[in-house]
Image (spheres, rainbow, N blue to C red):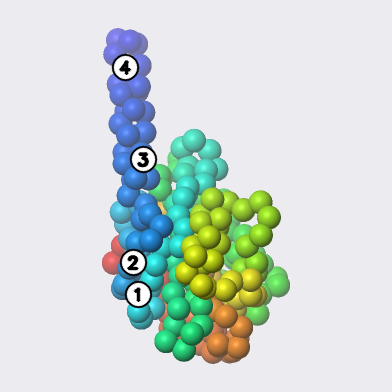
Amino acid sequence: MIRSILMVAMLATLVACQTTNSKLEAISPQGSVLTGEYLSANGRVKVPLPEGEWAVAGSGVARLGYDNPFEQVMLIQRSEDGYINLIEITSSVAKPKYGWARASLCEHTDMYSLHRVTNSDGGLQDCWGVEILDMNLKGDLQGFLRQTRDFAENNGMKLGFEARTVSYSLADKSYFLRVSYLYEPYQKTFDDLDAWGKGWYQKVKAGFEGK
């Protein structure tokens, strides 16, 4: 009886591992071109994309532990007026046993604006805000950022600017999403981004819920 229970447990672990690996293989590779939305490897979360074509500049996987891989993707676009826009996506691939730790974004005190609905440990997390992110991609970088740097250089896209950014962080007990929309300075004011972020929030939330 004990042997049967152990065999079932081992089989369940093997199936879960194979399922996670198949999801990791679904992460969009560098060079993929997307419009409308980005479907995360977990199969539920959809990230809405502003108008136009977006190229995958870099993609990869980070791990909190063996059972908690995260998809990391950077999308890039050159706007009609020549500005460089980026979207950074971090999304969970496998479901955790105990939910997610409280989102650091929802606790920041150095943002231009922060709109927090909730940020519970292991439960619902829901916030967004406007901040500055440094796109000076030098030094010891994560794999998807190295890919992004190389992709930009190879395609004549100059990075290195301090991006004015709208960032969202959403989580429930099964899924996590952090997505940032980055714009070159002087392309949009902070007030413009705060107004845009408020309107875009419902699209991000619906996409997180798989709608």
Q: x, y (%) of residue 70?
A: 47, 49
Q: Earlier in the sequence, mark 2 or mark 4?
A: 4
Q: Look at label 2 and name its amino acid.
A: Val
Whether label 2 touches label 4, CB < 8 Å:
no
Q: Quadrant of the N terminus?
A: top left
**Residue 189 placement, left or right of 13:** right
Q: Which numbered disc covers residue 53? A: 1
What residue does disc 3 label?
20
Q: CA distance from mark 1 to mark 4?
A: 48 Å
Q: Quadrant of residue 153?
A: bottom right
Q: Residue at x 60, y 88 (%)?
A: 186
Give the camera-side residue of 156 and 126.
156
Q: Which numbered disc covers residue 33? A: 2
Q: Badge 3: few (under 14), some or many (20 or more) residues near its Cα, within 10 Å? A: some
Q: x, y (%) of residue 87?
A: 47, 69
Q: Look at label 3 and name its amino acid.
A: Thr
Whether label 2 touches label 1, CB < 8 Å:
yes
Q: Nearer the viewer, mark 1 or mark 4?
A: 1
Q: Earlier in the sequence, mark 3 or mark 2?
A: 3
Q: CA distance from mark 3 to mark 2?
A: 24 Å
Q: Look at label 1 and name its amino acid.
A: Glu
Q: Which numbered disc covers residue 2? A: none
Q: Which numbered disc covers residue 7? A: 4
Q: Secondary structure at mark 3?
A: helix
11 vs 16: above or below: above
Q: x, y (%) of residue 34?
A: 33, 68
Q: CA distance from mark 3 to mark 4?
A: 20 Å
Q: Secondary structure at mark 4?
A: helix
Whether label 3 touches label 4, CB < 8 Å:
no
Q: Earlier in the sequence, mark 3 or mark 1?
A: 3
